[in-house]
């Protein structure tokens, strides 16, 4: 592949620099092998995953409008959808004229005050970390709660190995601190949250001489079949002022008109 993944390490993860668009997969995404003969079917379904997605939406404060006919029925979003703005309205008008599907965008940005998060003021700064403090990332949605509960946050550190006992259970990690020294952190439970590249890399680096294929890799599939979601950009010019700088950057309106396979 010619795709070069961009890696970002920091408190809050790579979401610090994302646009905050919040799209669910469709049921067909979990059965691409069965339906289209490509990739692999997932080992669980849309319906299996949905309750957990709704729980996360409540934790991060997602704004959106339920009822999109392209999706199965679901409950309401935690917050009302953000304004579509002039750009979104113009896009919706064009799709309406074409008879295409469209729907107001859903975003991990609360439209009202929510915990440590401020309501979105639509300045379009989503990709620079949202200085206004509205975009939901784990440094704002989860870390404040964890710190209040007694968690300790170690920054400028890089985990290099997961340690295990004779039974193969994780007992902690070895990490390099800000001064370049190895440190050991014991733990009853080790949770990996290093995205689709960092997590398998760390598993493959762990286990020692007794596990040349790394940890949790009896299938030999760790680090393989990475799924990504690259995007392409199309720009359009209008004579009318549309204030296109106004946020949210991620998603004001979307269309799934050509999402499903055309079997004709």
Image (cartoon, grey):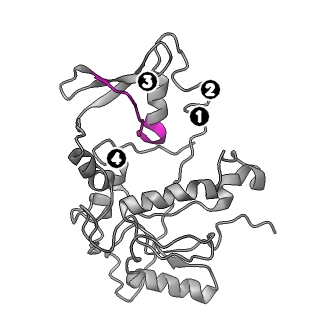
- Specify the label residue 170 is tagged with: 3
Task: For marks 3 and 2, give the one nearer the viewer.
Answer: 3
Give whichever of discs 2 and 4 has the lower sequence position. 4
Q: Considering only order in the chain, which callout, 4 or 1, is on the residue closer to the N terminus?
A: 4
CB atoms of marks 4 and 3 within 8 Å: no
- The residues tagged by marks 4 and 3 sit, at their Cα atoms, a distance apart of 23 Å
- The residue singled out by tag 2 in the image is 220
Q: Which mark is residue 224?
A: 1
Give the structural element (helix, strand or loop) at label 3. strand
Q: Residue 13, which numbered label?
A: 4
Front-most of 235 and 212? 212
> Would you say 203 lies left or right of 249 here?
right
* Marked residue nearer the N-terminal end (3 or 2): 3
Residue 187 among magenta residues: yes
Whole-percent x, y for residue 6 in the image: 41, 45
**Label 2: few (<14), some (14–19) or many (≥20) C-alpha neighbours in 10 Å:** few
* Alpha carbon separation for disc pair 2 and 4: 27 Å
Label whose residue precedes the other's in the sequence (3 or 1): 3
Q: CA distance from mark 1 to mark 2?
A: 8 Å
Question: Do the residues under discs 1 and 2 have CB atoms within 8 angstroms?
Answer: yes
Q: Quadrant of residue 136?
A: bottom left
Q: Looking at the rendering, which quadrant does residue 151 occupy? A: top left
- Which of the two marks, 1 or 4, is nearer to us in this view? 4
State the extent of the magenta-drawn residues as a range: 184-198
Q: Is residue 49 left or right of residue 64?
A: right
- Give percent across and percent down for residue 50: 56, 59
- The residue closer to the viewer here, 78 or 262, is 78
């Amino acid at each position: 592949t010619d795709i070069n993944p961009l890696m970002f390490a920091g408190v809050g993860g790579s979401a610090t620099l994302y646009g905050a668009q919040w799209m669910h997969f469709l049921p067909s995404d979990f059965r691409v092998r069965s339906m289209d003969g490509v990739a692999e079917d997932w080992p669980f379904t849309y319906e299996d995953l949905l309750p957990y997605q709704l729980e996360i939406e409540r934790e991060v404060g997602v704004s959106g409008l339920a009822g999109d006919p392209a999706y199965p029925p679901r409950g309401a979003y935690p917050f009302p959808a953000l304004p579509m703005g002039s750009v979104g309205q113009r896009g919706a008008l064009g799709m309406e004229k074409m008879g295409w599907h469209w729907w107001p965008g859903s975003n991990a940005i609360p439209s009202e005050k929510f915990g440590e998060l401020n309501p979105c003021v639509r300045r379009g700064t989503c990709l620079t970390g949202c200085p206004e403090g509205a975009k939901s990332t784990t440094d704002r949605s989860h870390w404040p709660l964890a710190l209040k509960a007694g968690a300790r946050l170690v920054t400028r550190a890089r985990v290099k190995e997961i340690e295990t006992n004779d039974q193969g259970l994780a007992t902690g990690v070895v990490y390099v601190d800000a001064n370049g020294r190895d440190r050991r952190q014991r733990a009853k439970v080790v949770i990996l949250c290093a995205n689709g590249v960092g997590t398998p890399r760390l598993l493959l680096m762990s286990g020692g001489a007794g596990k040349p294929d790394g940890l949790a890799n009896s299938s030999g599939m760790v680090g393989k079949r990475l799924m990504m979601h690259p995007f392409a950009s199309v720009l359009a010019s209008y004579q009318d002022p549309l204030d296109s700088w106004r946020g949210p950057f991620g998603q004001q309106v979307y269309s799934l008109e050509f999402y499903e396979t055309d079997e004709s």
